[in-house]
Amino acid sequence: MSAAFHLRLRTQPALRLDLAGITPTAMAGQDAAAFARRPLWHGNEALPLGEFFDVRVLADEAPTLVFEGDLGRCDGVGRAMDGGSLRVEGDVGDYLGAQLSAGEIRVSGSAGLLAACELAGGRLEVEGDVGDHAASALPGDMDGMRGGLFIVRGNVGARFGDRMRRGTVLIFGNAGDFLASRMVAGTIAVAGETGAHCGYAMRRGSLVFAGPPPAIPATFAATGHDIRVFWALLARSLAAHGGPFEGLAGWRPQRLVGDLSADGKGEWLLPG
Amino acid sequence: MSAATATTGADAMERNGVRVDDTFAEAFPMKATRVLITAHNATWANHAAVAMTGFATSVIACGCEAGIERVLSPDETPDGRPGVAVLLFAVSGKELAKQLERRVGQCVLTCPTTAIYAGLPAGEAIALGRNLRFFGDGWQISKMLDGVRYWRVPVMDGEFLAEETTPVVKAVGGGNLIFLADDTDAALGAAEAAVAAMRAVPGVIMPFPGGVVRSGSKIGSKYPALVASSNEAFCPALTPLAKKTELDAATGCVMEIVIDGLLEADVARAMRTGMEAVLALGAAAGVRRISAGNYGGKLGPYHFHLRKLLAGEVRS
């Protein structure tokens, strides 16, 4: 019996491999052999996890999973995870950390589509890039990311934060088109450039542009009031993550509200 | 609340010519919270705090007892502005919530540039900005930062920012000291010196005007409608008249300090600090005795024995 496991990808799966359900708390208390017998969907065929991964026990007493290898064809890594720690040494496929509610996921590479979808709690950190529709809603659902912390050290794709309604995101790189579209609430801070139609139909929530300011759409309008009190709280929270966000506390930001076509209570905070 | 009766010990302890009675202050459980008010500058933070803690001397008729605990420097406040820490005490969490909402709503929300935050790390949460947000009439917006929810309410100078809730903790109310002196100048001088020293003690307030109360009360009255009335045993005007008096003919003026604290140890520390300040003045300043008020020890679970406090027997 063990709480921590190391899983090394032995061979690249021929089809997409679904790792949903392989979470630190679900696997804690098993031995390596039982873990290796756990069935995984490979295309439409259920195969033992041991067909793809070498499993060995780690000394850590806390629920922990460490994946090693290029998991670019492995989807659902950390999906619905509810505690513990999960680390990936390499890239991962789609649905990384979707519906994560507690615990911590770290990926040293990049992630595919729909990362952090409906993330509700915990912390998800990706050193590389993430694909389209990250921090948004799962297909067919109404609400996107709804809590927790999502950090992307690289770039993000299109429709990032679509329908997002709570939580905090920091994007150290660039963002694709339709960043924060239909955003309901929450905070997204982006250090790089943003694509077209940023904030499209956003209703509430905060967008912080720590890098180049975006083009201002006609449906966003400046407010001239003093927001230093709120900014002091927000900037300190974001500055704790360092890098391009470290100097935010020194700003006196310009504030825009919008999207005026959709309630208009969202806000953009730009360098003053 | 304030004193009812006091006991004069036969083997009176004396320091610097001032006698310390062999008696104790009797205190009661209360519910309390600490809130931090910040503003554009210290003046406006103080205006808000003074207004919010006004008419909050006694739970007998004010609903709560409140006071400024201390002034906060910008590096001690959540938003980096000057601030004031305020403590509120009430007989129940429900009453405390009611008083807090009214006072913040009328005195802090209304005061230019202010913001308000919870000042205790843990406890049962009561609304701070949670209900006041509705003043925004739908324009209010919230923000969760590092697990804490704040409300931003649009007002004419910008935004009123309030943390959603503040924790309530069990606390101690009704610690007290009574100074018996030759005359008004001496009694006031002693009380002022004690209050000045006690204000440096964290976790306590002295809720009466200037920290001092001259109308020590007893429970009940000859008039059935009154729950409290003047404590004739400490009134110099009644020394020759009252059936029972705690004063001698030379005592011309008496002042009391009531202390509410977050912890029993806070109240004890404040009482000892106050007594030491008055004992340092000595009989030369016209102070004759230090006493304390109690109800015979049967009503309140906290007993602060003056001599034990001075001897360091009570951990404070």
Image: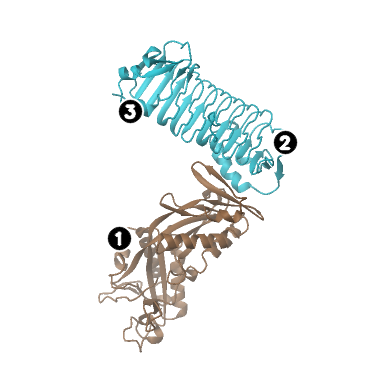
Residue at (67, 38) in percent of width and height = A270
Q: Position of residue A264 (x, y in %)?
A: 66, 43
Q: Secondary structure at mark 1?
A: loop
- The amino acid sitting under disc 3 is Glu
Residue at (46, 31) in percent of width and height = A100
Q: Is disc 1 in contact with disc 2, using a CB cutoff of under 8 Å?
A: no
Q: Is disc 1 in contact with disc 3, using a CB cutoff of under 8 Å?
A: no
Nearer mark to the viewer, of 3 and 2: 2
Residue A24, image quadrant: top left
Colour setup of the view: by chain
Q: Which chain is cyan?
A: A
Nearer mark to the viewer, of 1 and 3: 3
**Callout 1 environment at 10 Å: few (<14), some (14 to 19), or many (20+)?**
some
- Please state, as top left, top right, bottom left or bottom right, where the N terminus of chain A lies in the image: top left
- Write down the residue under mark 1: B314
Q: Residue furthest right?
A: A218
In the picture, the disc for residue A217 is: 2
Q: Say yes or no: labels 1 and 3 on the same chain.
A: no
Q: Which chain is brown?
A: B
